[in-house]
Every structure is written in structure tokens, then in C-alpha cells.
Image (cartoon, rainbow, N blue to C red):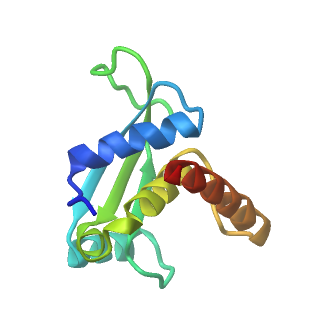
Amino acid sequence: MPVWTEAKLHILAKSLLKRLKVNGGVLDIFLLKDADIAALKARFIKKKTEPNVLSFKEPLAFPHPELKKGKYLGEVYLNKDILRREPERAAPLLLHGILHLLGHDHEKKTDAKKMEEVEKKILEGLER
């Protein structure tokens, strides 16, 4: 399994966005230590779950003059300690974060089921 860097995760993100049929989507990916992502999660999310991935959408009218084309989706924060211990979780966690940027959530059971179905379909396609 690869050692995941932000650059390698960007390559994976491009593949995931292509499979999701998102053309021109741009996002930032950050790798944080366990304690740092836990602190960030505690600040914004009150749910008691593993601090593995966080996503933050960009406000709709936020300007991005550096983008010549494409749409800025937001930021994904991944727990680099988890990826070091379990590198096979990179694609599922990154995909989960991207789906949140695209508007998916799992607050309701029906929404969670839809999100899980999309995740399963995309991840199965990656394995081929």
C-alpha cells in the first residue's frame, strides 16, 4: 500500500471526481494528525464518531480568482495517522469527504443509504 501524501491524494481525488462525473471540480486536501483532526471535529461537529474525515464546503459566493476554470468544491481533512496505519482506507475516506462536498449527507437513514450506495458503486469501480 502507498504512503499517502496530499499530492497522491489529489491524484486519487481526480479519479474519484471523474467516476462521479464531476467535471472541473477542485478541492483542497489536508492531512492532519489524530489530535489535530479530533480538535477540529470537536469544534465543528458534536457527534461522537471516529475523527477520520471532515469536509467543509466553500461558501457559494466565495471568490477564487486563482481558478481559471472549474468549480471550487471545498476542503477535505483526512486523519493521516489512520492512513498510515490503514492505507487501504484512503479511497473510502476521501470519497466520503468528497460526497459531503457534493451535498450528500447521512443524517437521515434514507440519505445515509443513498450515500452508501454511491460509495459502494464508486469504490467497486476503483477496484477493477
Hey, which residue is sitting farthest front in the picture?
Answer: 128
Q: Is residue 125 left or right of residue 74?
A: right
Check the image and report above or below for 10 versus 97. Answer: above
Q: Residue at x 31, y 77 (%)?
A: 38
Quadrant into which the N terminus falls: bottom left
In front of the other: 121 or 107:
121
Occupied quadrant, residue 114: bottom right
Occupied quadrant, residue 20: top right
Hey, which residue is sitting farthest top in the picture?
Answer: 68
Residue 114 is at least partly visible in this image: yes
In front of the other: 43 or 95:
95
Hey, which residue is sitting farthest right in the picture?
Answer: 110
Q: Residue at x 63, y 59 (%)?
A: 120
Q: Residue at x 69, y 66 (%)?
A: 112
Q: Position of residue 48 (x, y in %)?
A: 48, 85
Q: Position of residue 91 (x, y in %)?
A: 43, 57
Hey, which residue is sitting farthest bottom in the picture?
Answer: 48
In front of the other: 75 or 118:
118
Q: Is residue 12 left or right of residue 32?
A: right
Q: Residue at x 32, y 62 (%)?
A: 78
Q: Position of residue 16 (x, y in %)?
A: 48, 43
